[in-house]
Image: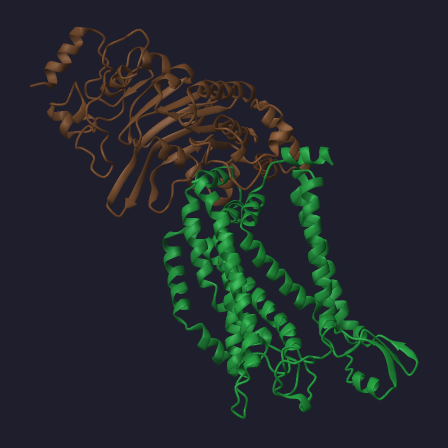
């Protein structure tokens, strides 16, 4: 861990002890978020990306969830070792969270001003009037017109995009070092999505905070993220900087994901899909969890029996796939394949 | 005026305001609410409505005000409480119009604190400095003997503890509108004073049971798991105790006092509240806004009672109105059986029990009127509870 790292998740495993059995929602996930950078966690629903985010906040519902191993280092602190009281100080103050559904993430019985002011009052020890003024100021910063009037309104009087702005204002109000945005635009209209992401970018530049962006929308990731980790079935499949990952995806799953993004100019063609469905965390397949759907190694005995570790195949590029090697030429690739396909 | 209403509009409509509007839409609710308000007024103004002491009388040429002189410290405390309650309601209305929302919570807290302390200090002063005066003068006798004149009596010129064996067990007549009981006391007068007992039992018992129920229910619901499992078994043990017989046992053992009855009803009927709140909190704790509140680092107290409780209080409010009706009912039943408040303090249930006189005569007015009073009060509270539930429900459906 170097000085520019804000948050380092190391070998995090989260299990859910349900009545139907043990669900390993997150297994051995490691990644690091740099200061002032945007880190994207990409994956289909149920792959464990939201649970990872909740683990950082220590909000995994317990029971049935439990963080069974790993470390989450926020600068020098291991968040998993903090007391609940210390953790409360971290929440909101150092790490804040934006939720997916703006319709339900604001409390219906308070005005939005009160909700923002409460956090400010708590973390910055300001009196009611100062906190209220700050809340109005925050609403202005997130681009809400007539902030004084709007602060006195209740959430149900606002549109979805407006509420997400309020949510952002609330989480940014105490100037946290890290914002966890859990699918912040999924529930919004396409026209609003870009506005919200631009707003996050803008605030990031002003405050110099880091963002952990959790999404299944690769278009969002390509534009905004500095680093990307692709998750599949509770593990990280591929981890790299955004640009090389999009230019040359190494994991067959990432390749499939990128192919299935609709693009302009390809009219009439059928959109590529990844066959099959995400495995149920109660019944993961043996070996590499992607092998039943994998176009490359589906028949490979090794893929079916042994799970590949996340390896650094090229500088800064981590892939969990037996086929991803540091080959540079087609010949090397052929050699590799002949070696394992017998 | 126009300016104010425009400003008010931009301040938004609160949840409570919406429920109020929905509630008022149904005229039956308003009728029931008015009935309850009248009941309250009767209870508060009882000494001015029914009293054997005149407001004013000229005795031996001297002007006297025996009614005011005979008011006890608790009478004054009740009047003070009512006045402060009305004043607070007016203040809340005015706050909504004149105070900025940013400081409204603070202002309200300050007002509540000031008013509560005025009430507390006032009551203590009344109880410490008011001499206990027993005025047993028979003013009517004085008038008929010609010593006194110019008397102004309350509409019902009888005291609740005044016995008059000459007119015992009289059916309704011009002098006694609802008849008299076995010791010749006026039934209407005792009914009016009895509303005090019923209301205080209802509110204090429900207050105690709601507080306990909300506290236990919210903790069980929020933490779930083992806490919930153990807690719910305790709740079930509590529910297995037959409340009515427990109360009879305790009252038989200790004193027959109103205080005991209120506290025991409160301490034994909280289980329903706890279960409602627990169910609500189960639902709420995984809601995004609760997660958002936790993720802002708010302390548990604030998450539980500021963010979750207002969203889950609806069933408690409804249950409270039913609970008041239930507590009134229990008190009436206890008094009917002779375990309630001790005579001569009037209570509806105890009056009901006098309906069959010791001579075996059935005195219909002693059964009908207290019975009607119990029936109407319980009905009004139940219907208000229903109305409240309906007023809250459509909004919950919209939000879901």
Q: Is residue A183 left or right of residue A265?
A: right
Chain letter for the brown part? A
Q: In this view of the protein, which residue sits in the foreground, A74 or B10?
A: B10
* Residue B61 percent coordinates (x, y): 93, 80
Q: In this view of the protein, which residue sits in the foreground, B71 or B217?
A: B71
Residue positioned 61% across, 68% down in the render: B200
Q: Is residue B62 left or right of residue A28?
A: right
- Chain B on-screen colour: green
* Residue B355 percent coordinates (x, y): 54, 83
The total of numbered circles placed on residues is 0
Q: Is residue B87 left or right of residue A107?
A: right
* Residue A37 percent coordinates (x, y): 46, 20
- Placement of the N terminus of chain A among the 4 image quadrants: top left
- Placement of the C terminus of chain A among the 4 image quadrants: top left
In the displayed image of the protein, which residue is found farthest to the left? A342
Residue positioned 57% across, 75% down in the render: B369
Residue positioned 65% across, 86% down in the render: B184
Q: Work out whether residue A79 can be spotted.
A: yes
In the displayed image of the protein, which residue is found farthest to the bottom? B359
Q: Work out whether residue A1 can be spotted.
A: no
Residue B393 in the image: above or below residue B71: above
Residue positioned 72% across, 79% down in the render: B158
């Amino acid at each position: 861990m170097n000085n520019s790292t804000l948050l380092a998740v190391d070998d995090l495993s989260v299990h859910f002890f349900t009545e139907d059995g043990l669900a390993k929602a997150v297994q051995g996930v490691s990644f690091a978020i740099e200061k002032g950078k945007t880190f994207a966690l990409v994956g289909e629903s149920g792959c464990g990306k939201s649970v990872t985010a909740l683990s950082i906040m220590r909000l995994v519902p317990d029971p049935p969830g439990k963080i069974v191993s790993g470390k989450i280092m926020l600068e020098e602190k291991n968040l998993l070792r903090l007391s609940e009281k210390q953790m409360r100080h971290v929440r909101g103050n150092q790490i804040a969270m934006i939720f997916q559904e703006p319709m339900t993430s604001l409390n219906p019985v308070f005005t939005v001003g009160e909700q923002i002011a409460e956090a400010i009052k708590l973390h910055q020890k300001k009196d009611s009037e100062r906190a209220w003024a700050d809340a109005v100021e925050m609403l202005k910063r997130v681009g809400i017109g007539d902030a004084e009037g709007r602060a006195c309104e209740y959430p149900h009087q606002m549109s979805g995009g407006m509420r997400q702005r309020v949510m952002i204002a609330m989480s940014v109000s105490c100037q946290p070092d890290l914002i966890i945005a859990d699918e912040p635009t999924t529930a919004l209209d396409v026209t609003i999505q870009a506005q919200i992401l631009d707003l996050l970018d803008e605030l990031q530049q002003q405050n110099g905070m880091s963002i952990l962006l959790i999404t299944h929308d690769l278009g969002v990731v390509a534009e905004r993220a500095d680093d990307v980790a692709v998750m599949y079935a509770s593990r990280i499949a591929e981890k790299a900087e955004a640009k090389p990952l999009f230019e040359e995806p190494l994991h067959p799953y990432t390749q499939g994901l990128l192919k299935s993004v609709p693009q302009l100019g390809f009219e009439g063609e059928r959109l590529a899909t990844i066959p099959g469905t995400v495995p149920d965390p109660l019944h993961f397949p043996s070996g590499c969890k992607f092998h039943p759907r994998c176009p490359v190694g589906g028949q490979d005995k090794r893929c079916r029996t042994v799970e590949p570790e996340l390896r650094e195949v090229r500088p800064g590029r981590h892939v969990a796939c037996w086929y991803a090697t540091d080959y540079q030429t087609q010949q090397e690739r052929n050699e590799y394949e002949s070696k394992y396909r017998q | 005026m126009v300016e104010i209403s425009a400003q008010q509009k931009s301040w938004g409509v609160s949840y409570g305001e919406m429920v109020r509007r929905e509630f008022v839409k149904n005229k039956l609710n308003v009728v029931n609410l008015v009935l309850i308000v009248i009941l309250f007024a009767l209870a508060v103004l009882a000494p001015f409505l029914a009293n054997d002491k005149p407001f004013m009388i000229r005795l031996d040429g001297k002007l006297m005000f025996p009614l005011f002189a005979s008011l006890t410290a608790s009478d004054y405390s009740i009047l003070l409480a009512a006045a402060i309650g009305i004043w607070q309601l007016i203040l809340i209305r005015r706050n909504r119009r004149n105070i900025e929302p940013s400081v409204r919570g603070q202002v309200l807290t300050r007002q509540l604190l000031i008013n509560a302390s005025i009430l507390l200090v006032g009551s203590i002063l009344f109880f410490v400095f008011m001499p206990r005066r027993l005025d047993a003068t028979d003013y009517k006798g004085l008038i008929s003997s010609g010593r006194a004149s110019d008397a102004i009596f309350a509409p019902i010129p009888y005291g609740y503890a005044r016995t008059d064996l000459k007119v015992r067990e009289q059916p309704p007549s011009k002098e006694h509108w609802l008849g008299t009981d076995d010791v010749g006391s006026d039934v209407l007068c005792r009914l009016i004073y009895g509303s005090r007992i019923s209301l205080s039992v209802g509110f204090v018992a429900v207050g105690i049971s709601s507080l306990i129920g909300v506290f236990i229910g919210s903790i069980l619901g929020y933490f779930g798991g083992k806490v919930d499992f153990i807690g719910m078994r305790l709740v079930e043990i509590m529910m297995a105790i037959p409340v009515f017989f427990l109360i009879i046992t305790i009252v038989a053992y200790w004193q027959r006092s109103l205080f005991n009855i209120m506290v025991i009803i409160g301490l034994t009927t909280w289980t329903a509240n706890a279960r409602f709140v627990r169910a609500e909190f189960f639902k709420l704790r995984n809601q995004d806004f609760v997660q958002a509140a936790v993720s802002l680092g708010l302390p548990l107290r604030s998450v539980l009672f500021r963010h979750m409780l207002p969203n889950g209080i609806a069933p408690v409010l409804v249950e409270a109105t039913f609970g008041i009706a239930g507590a009134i009912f229990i008190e009436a039943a206890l008094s009917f059986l002779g375990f309630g408040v001790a005579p001569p303090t009037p209570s509806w249930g105890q009056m009901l029990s006098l309906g069959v006189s010791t001579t075996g005569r059935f005195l219909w007015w002693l059964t009908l009127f207290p019975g009607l009073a119990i029936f109407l009060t319980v009905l009004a509270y139940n219907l208000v509870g229903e109305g409240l539930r309906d007023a809250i429900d459509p909004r919950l459906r919209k939000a879901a």
